[in-house]
Amino acid sequence: MDRDVWSGLAVFAEIVEAGSFAAAAKRLGISSSALSHAMRSLEARLNVRLLNRTTRSLAPTDAGQILLARLQPALSSVADILGELDSVRSKPIGRVRVNAHKPAASYLILPRLPKFSRDHPEVSIDLTVDDGMVDIVAERFDCGVRHDKALQADMISARISGPLELVFVASPAYLDLNGRPGNPEALGSHRCISYRHATSGVIHRWEFAYGGERTNQAVPTSFVTNDIDIMRDAALRGLGICCLLVDQAAVHLRSGDLVEVMSGWAPALPPCHIYYPTKRQPTAAFQAFLAAMREF
């Protein structure tokens, strides 16, 4: 087969799956104009129109639908074959695309990458930090990392951490001005720094754990953000009390720039899991990454 036709067919399938030239170009790492040129060239070689395009929509023509129905199984078979070849290489090579929320990216994945990079120098990691809910199959990620209650259905998953400990903190300057709360009821007279969930836009209700019981409540919020590092920085600047990961706050607690409050009331987040599709042949690079993440 003409190699230009074969590459054009792969591009055609990618565009239809992505839903737009821009989305397909982002996945493939090339320009939209290059994709458009490839599609025009394919349609000219086949002498048939495959896509109906407007400024707002894109859909395969009847001929495109027929072609796509036969093409997708063939492309899937090629991907499986390449995966099988990859698994017998003497050493992992390639790229692993990971989607993880901020706590996992910063405090679970990143600390394990130096050793992984030394052990597997020919594997590159493409880490996207996203605190929202993501369809990792549609977005072509090899895996995602979330708490166990936020995993996509029909996925293989493996735990990569224990519970993530939290701590309530504030700056000494804030406490000098406003006093030090000893329990959640005392927060009514304080300024609090809260987190807004990326997908729903809802402000997170603070959670507390004491004596084996877990409760949650709304608190008087004076500052809201959807980034946990901005929460920490706001606390350092005296904007109020906030709840951080112990790992995130540790260096500032040791230096005295932050002070723990309501000791014994902080809960823990559920363990994090790495998850990936059941139907995709794992590459050797991904299998090496998975093994590294499971070492905790």
Image (tube, grey):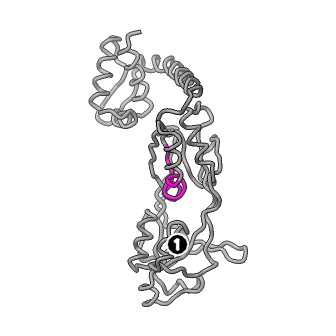
What's the residue at 53%, 42% (across, down)?
119
Q: Where's residue 216, x and y in %?
A: 61, 72
Question: What predominant SS class does the magenta segment belong to?
Answer: helix
Secondary structure beneath label 1: strand
What's the residue at 58%, 41% (across, down)?
276
Q: Decide which of 233, 6 is in the foreground and name it.
A: 233
Q: Where's residue 221, x and y in %?
A: 46, 76
Q: Where's residue 132, x and y in %?
A: 48, 53
Q: Which residues are magenta?
A: 98-111
**Residue 217 is covered by the magenta coloring:** no
Relative placement, left or right, of 47 versus 241 is left
Q: Where's residue 20, x and y in %?
A: 37, 34
Considering every residue shown, the one lying at the far right of the view is 212
- Look at the picture and state if 107 lies above or below 91: below
The quadrant of the image that shows the C terminus is bottom right
Which amino acid is tagged 1? Answer: Cys
- Look at the picture and state if 72 lies above or below 186: above
The quadrant of the image that shows the N terminus is top left
